[in-house]
Image: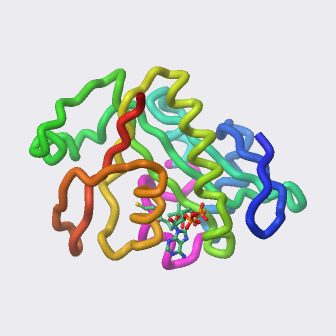
Amino acid sequence: MNFTTRNNKVIRISKYCPGDLDDLFHYLQHLGEATRKRFGPHPFDRSSLQDFHASPEHAGYIATENDAGRIIAYAIIKNGMLHHDIPRLQSYGLQPDASGDCTFAPSVADDWQSFGIGDGLFRFILSDVSEKKQKRIILWGGVQADNQKAVNYYLKNGFNMLGQFDYNGPNYDMILNLP
Ligand SMILES: CC(C)(COP(=O)(O)OP(=O)(O)OC[C@H]1O[C@@H](n2cnc3c(N)ncnc32)[C@H](O)[C@@H]1OP(=O)(O)O)[C@@H](O)C(=O)NCCC(=O)NCCS
């Protein structure tokens, strides 16, 4: 899917495939410190990336700048809930639904944030998740309460607060219920 950003650049959004490994490695190695502090669902070395994406439980999504062919955003959907988050999610009254739940972690390269790419990526992911008949999208390890950009992003895209927990400071669990 092609998409025009707020700064008038055409980017392509697609599912990650193994041929994207080198570009994804480069993207992750060049993520700025601020974004690395917020986004770290898996280690960023090549073999961890390969292992992670070899699992049928995981889907990756990338946005590529059309002019330079570089990856500028990357997001993950994991089927089901994150294992170690289940007790916390159950404390809000959620029961795991292996086929209906999925878990989401997004990132956009520092220089490309706030131009609409996160929204575009999420629209693409939503259509994929809906095709798989998944019904709930849960944040991967929640979101840090002081990450206002991300909290706004999730609220704008229809997520609701489930509750708050402490891990290196306050964090929110959020969920999107799909029709
Ligand atoms: C959070 C993130 C994925 C959002 O993607 P993005 O491309 O920057 O966001 P978009 O430009 O598509 O904006 C979507 C919404 O996010 C919020 N947002 C984006 N930039 C913002 C800013 N600078 N300040 C406040 N809210 C902001 C707004 O609600 C915005 O909607 P609006 O443009 O209608 O106001 C991206 O900023 C990012 O990767 N951040 C670092 C990593 C991270 O925090 N990941 C999430 C971990 S839980």
Q: Is residue 92 above or below residue 102?
A: below
Residue name at image x 70 percent, y 52 percent: 63
Residue in the foreground of this view, choosing between 125 and 60 = 125
Residue at screen point 48% across, 61% down: 153
Tell me the quarter of the image containing the N terminus.
top right
x, y percent for residue 97: 27, 25
Q: Which range of residues does the magenta coloring cover?
A: 31-48
Quadrant hosting residue 4: bottom right
Looking at the rendered structure, the number of numbered marks drawn on it comes to 0
The residue sitting at 61% across, 67% down in the picture is 29
For the C terminus, the quadrant is: top left
Task: Please say whether residue 13 is one of the residues in the magenta stretch.
Answer: no
Residue 86's place in the image compared with 24, above or below, is above
> Horizontal and vertical percent for residue 121?
62, 49
Q: Which residue lies furthest to the right in this view?
A: 67
Name the residue nearer the viewer: 129 or 49.
129
Q: Is residue 86 left or right of residue 30?
A: left
Q: How is the image coloured?
A: rainbow
Residue 65, located in which quarter of the rendered image? Answer: bottom right
**Residue 63 left/right relative to 121:** right
Question: Residue 168's spot in the image, x, y percent?
Answer: 23, 73
96 vs 15, left or right, is left
User: In front: 159, or 77?
Assistant: 159
- Up the image or down, 71 lies above or below 80; here it is below
Q: In this view, does 170 lie to the left or right of 21?
A: left
Give percent across and percent down for residue 56.
49, 26
Choose between 136 and 76: the one closer to the eye.
Answer: 136
Asked if the stretch drawn in magenta spans residue 39, the answer is: yes
Task: Name which residue lies at 13% across and 44% down.
Answer: 92
